[in-house]
Amino acid sequence: MRPSNFRTIAKREYLARLRSKGFWISTIALPVMMAAWAILPSLMVAKARTSQKLAVVDRTHQVAELLQQALDALAKRTADQVSFELEVVQPQADVDSQRAALDQRVLDEEIAAWVWIDSELLAENRVEYHAESVSNFITQQALIGALSAAVQKVRLVESGYDPEIVAELSSSIDLDTVRISEAGSSAEGGLGGFALAFAVFMVLYMTTLIYGQQVMLGVLEEKSSRVVEVLLSTVAPFDLMAGKIAGIGLAGLTQIAIWFATAAVLTAPGVVAIMAFLPAGTELPTLSPILVLHFFLLFILGYFFYATFYAMIGSAFNNPQEAQQMASLAVIFVVLPWIFFLPILNDPDSTLAVVTSLIPIFTPFLMVLRIAVKMPPTWQILLGYFLTTAMCAGMIWLCARIYRVGILMYGKKPSLKELWRWVRYA
């Protein structure tokens, strides 16, 4: 391998991607989409208002008043985002006539819906809800919650219990989570730790897959245009493959660094605002320097493994359609870590977590997930690095031999037997 050739090719691949519009569009698009996902739903919820004029026929003469109280409390909790205008209608002797009259009021748009409550239905834990549209499940769920609270109070009073005392005695318990580390203990929300681990895992997953595919498409493009024949007159096949992989990988690292910097800038004001409302001693999960270091190291290992595999595919086949069939094998191994995501997140020290994070093809994804949740023992991290590095070296040796032959082969799609012959005789 000639370092000068390697550097020239890597520099060319790196700068070519940095100068492309697609690189900057994707670099800007992801933070914008993340900000939109974080902000737009909150804005929509804040602006959304659900109000419904509701007629209630309470044949028990016990629920309507308590239902009004429950709906008033709901409106206060949601800042009037979910509210009901309740009209209590007195029961009439002619049930069929009254129900028909309520239906007509709905059709005339005097009311949005009407509710029928009687003892027989309550005995079966049911209440009738009539409206022109019954797809408003959000409104219905709010109404069900208020009705349940009102009926529970009625039943408690009938059984001789004070509803307020029962509510106080049966109130749920909050779990204050405290993370223990050698630096000391600190309160930390479980949801925040989950979000951090998921974000790190997702970025690593996406970039490895995207940039591995770019290597394959780049090799195919050079092969189909016969540019590679000119390059190989002055550059060794291994230098060409290594330079291409390194250059595209550096572009990926550059993009990740921009994403991290953008995320830090965008989230800083929100983090400061959130910290002002958190209890004393509570800390948000942070990207520690050691986690960032492991992230980049594991990205490099994972990227080199999959990028080398994609380069081999690009060199062996003649067009993207043929190559994608073989590339689906790599996608399977990239997607498989999602199966272990939640079990490892829940118990990062389990046998499943330890074993799968030491399997070289999974180590770049699952080891960084374990580190984000809870730092594994040093021997496990070192063993993971050693096995993954050995796997990458073996993959580079294998793919380089196929690349050396396949990059100049045209015509029919090679079989697995032919690929093995290239490995033996290259």
Image: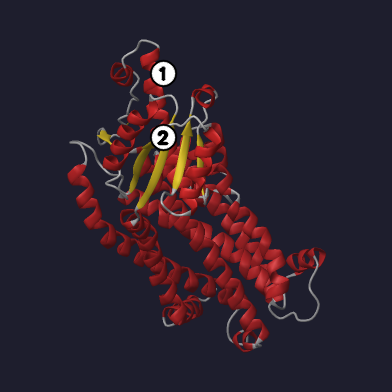
Q: Element type at marker 2?
A: helix
Q: Quadrant of the N terminus?
A: bottom right
Place of residue 369 in the rendered image (x, y in percent of width and height, measured from the top left): 45, 46
Q: Residue at x 51, y 57 (%)?
A: 205
- Residue type for callout 2: Gly
Q: Nearer the viewer, mark 2 or mark 1?
A: 1
Residue that carries the numbered disc 1 in the rendered image: 155
Graded by Cα atoms within 10 Å as few (under 14), some (14 to 19) or many (20 or more), the crowding at tag 1 reads few
Q: Nearer the viewer, residue 390 or 122?
A: 122
Q: Nearer the viewer, residue 245 or 65?
A: 65
Place of residue 250 in the rendered image (x, y in percent of width and height, measured from the top left): 44, 70
Q: Residue at x 49, y 46 (%)?
A: 137
Place of residue 41 in the rendered image (x, y in percent of width and height, measured from the top left): 38, 56
Q: Nearer the viewer, residue 33 or 98?
A: 98
Q: Is residue 324 visible?
A: yes
Q: CA distance from mark 2 to mark 1?
A: 15 Å
The residue lying furthest to the top in this view is 160
Q: Element type at marker 1?
A: helix
Graded by Cα atoms within 10 Å as few (under 14), some (14 to 19) or many (20 or more), the crowding at tag 2 reads some
Q: Quadrant of the C terminus?
A: bottom right
- Residue type for callout 1: Arg
Residue 33 in the figure: left or right of residue 309 = left
Q: Earlier in the sequence, mark 2 or mark 1?
A: 2
Q: Quadrant of residue 36?
A: bottom left
Residue that carries the numbered disc 2 in the rendered image: 145
Q: Residue at x 31, y 64 (%)?
A: 262
Q: Quadrant of residue 231?
A: bottom right
Q: How many marks?
A: 2
